[in-house]
Image (cartoon, grey):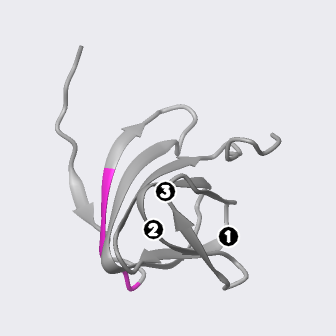
């Protein structure tokens, strides 16, 4: 067994505010595979940016909103999952606070219950 203290960093790019990310895991293959734990403070924003790879965003506590390519805001809460494709513009935030698990992969990702 190996234990490791994970490092948390504040998201500074894209006009973001009140968002921290902790990288929980990564893999050498496939290249680009990452898992992050994200914490959104009250009145937070992770500003609009392009997905470099497939991204699965799963809310683990609290609630907030997400925005996709169409610019429409969608409310998300505990148990909701969102998938963004590579190149898709998106943003997310929270009025009252939210935590999420973010999985990034160069291989297609699907939320449970959606066909592969």
**N-terminal label among 3 and 2:** 2
What secondary structure is marked by label 1?
loop
Residue 17 visible from this viewpoint:
no
Q: Marks 1/2: CA distance?
A: 22 Å
Local crowd size for mark 1, using a 10 Å CA cut-off: few (<14), some (14–19), many (≥20): some
Q: Nearer the viewer, residue 66 or 97?
A: 97
| Image quadrant in which the N terminus is located | top left
Q: Is 36 placed left or right of 17 in the picture?
A: right
Q: Marks 3/1: CA distance?
A: 23 Å
Q: Is residue 8 above or below residue 94?
A: above
Q: Nearer the viewer, residue 51 or 20?
A: 20
| Image quadrant in which the C terminus is located | top right
The residue wearing badge 3 is 78
Per the rendering, the mark at residue 58 is: none
Measured as percent of width and height from the top left, residue 92 is found at: 50, 74
Contact (Cβ within 8 Å) of mark 3 with mark 2: yes
Magenta-drawn segment: 15-22
Q: Is residue 28 above or below residue 64?
A: above
Magenta stretch encompasses residue 34: no
Q: Nearer the viewer, residue 93 or 91?
A: 93
Q: Nearer the viewer, residue 23 or 60?
A: 60
**N-terminal label among 1 and 2:** 2
Q: Is 75 placed left or right of 68 in the picture?
A: left
The residue wearing badge 1 is 88
The residue wearing badge 2 is 63
């Amino acid at each position: 067994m190996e234990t490791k203290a994970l490092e948390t960093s504040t998201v500074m790019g894209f006009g973001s505010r009140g968002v921290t990310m902790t990288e929980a895991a990564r893999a050498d293959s496939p290249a680009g595979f990452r898992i992050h734990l994200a914490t959104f403070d009250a009145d937070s924003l992770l500003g609009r940016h392009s997905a470099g790879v497939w991204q699965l965003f799963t809310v683990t506590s609290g609630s907030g909103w997400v925005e996709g390519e169409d610019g429409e805001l969608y409310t998300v809460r505990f148990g909701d999952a969102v998938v963004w494709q590579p190149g898709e513009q998106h943003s997310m935030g929270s009025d009252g606070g939210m935590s999420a698990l973010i999985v990034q992969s160069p291989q297609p990702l699907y939320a449970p219950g959606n066909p592969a």
